[in-house]
Image: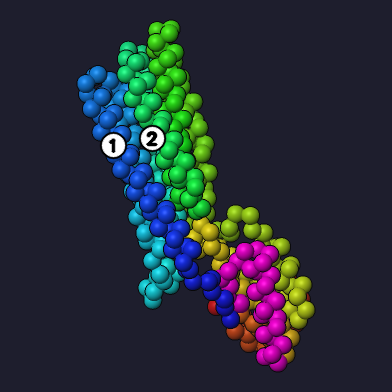
Amino acid sequence: MHMHAAPTGPNQAQSAGKTQSVLRFSLVATLAYVALTFIAGLRAHSLALLSEAGHNVSDFLALLLSFVAVYFQSRPADDHRTFGYQRAGVLAAFLNAATLVVISLWIAVEAIHRLSAPVVVQPRLMMYVAAAGVLMNGVIAALLWGVARDVNLRSSFIHMAGDTLSTAAVIIGGLGILLTGQNWIDPVLSLIIAALILWSSAGIVRETLNILLEGTPRGVNLPEIRAEMAAIPGVLNVHDLHCWNIGSQSRALACHVTIDDIPPSASAVILGDLRHILKDHFDICHSTIQFEHTNCEVLEGCVVPPEEMIGATGGGHHHHH
């Protein structure tokens, strides 16, 4: 006995279209800024600006990854992908965040190197180009914040928000260098930014890995679910309980429930109560519940004496599948 999530409706389709429009604008704006920083870096012989261009290439790839993921997530389920493509966004978020971890480590290494061997920079050009970057990254981050409802877009938002901060730091650093002539300001700011990027992206990596490894969803307490299900009249035992994320926003559950030997109409009432608890109390919209009766010596999915089944708590007996 199972329950499926509701099909995608007009509101979700409209939301997906809005998200794709935001990502499409972000891709064009980021590519334009990459060209600007690359050309400015070549003309000014500025390694900092060329590095900024390379950094924004990674932004472009991250946004492209999110755009592709949103497209796949909107595709319906079929016989080959029975849950659809909901994990496309989770996979994109993992790759995006993992890239951010690598970038933050690279920034930290480069900053340490520059502290030991300072590089003379051109602060005015840094500030002009960075000002354009703050404007662009800030607008993109604000747009992404408005549509960031899953872990995929949240990782893109963090990516662009981190870029806004790092580009703003370039302006502050350029001003500090212009006023004091101290070139060490630039790498120190870079170390601070790298730490912030690493901290924010590590959380996304943990969350997406948990989903990809089908761990228990964040904020879900299995003993609490088991207790509420077992408290329903007619339920004797809940066992073989599993809960996981299909995508970043959808949860699934499967379990065995032992009930008395009662007529189908009574078991249908119990099933309805179980569904109500799972959906309204725990936001689980896809559940597969297998009923087992106490008068059966050979139970579907479990081979145990009925007496042991009734007295067992969740996970307190062995299953032979």
Task: Tell me the kind of residue under disc 2.
Answer: Met
Question: Magenta includes 117?
Answer: no
Q: Which residues are magenta?
A: 263-289
Residue 37 x/y as whole percent: 29, 28
Residue identified by numbered label 1: 32
Q: Mark 2: few, some, or many residues within 10 Å (few <14, many ≥20)?
A: some
Inspect the magenta stretch and tell me whether residue 270 lies in it. yes
Q: Is residue 218 left or right of residue 34?
A: right
- Vertical position of residue 79 compared to residue 197: above or below: below
Answer above or below: position of 55 versus 239.
above
- Name the secondary structure under disc 1: helix
Whether label 1 touches label 2, CB < 8 Å: yes
Residue beneath label 2, please? 136
Looking at the picture, tell me which residue is in the foreground, 287 or 300: 287
**Looking at the image, which residue is at 34% across and 49% down?**
24
Kindly identify the residue that appears in the image at 44 percent across and 61 percent down: 14
Label 1 environment density (alpha carbons within 10 Å; few <14, some 14–19, many ≥20): few
Indicate the position of residue 172 as horizontal and vertical percent values. Answer: 45, 19
User: Is residue 19 at all visible to an observer of this figure?
Assistant: yes
Residue 231: image quadrant is: bottom right
| Total marks placed | 2
x%, y% of residue 212? 47, 57
Q: Residue at x 45, y 45 (%)?
A: 144
Q: Main secondary structure of the magenta part?
A: helix
Q: Nearer the viewer, residue 13 or 286?
A: 13
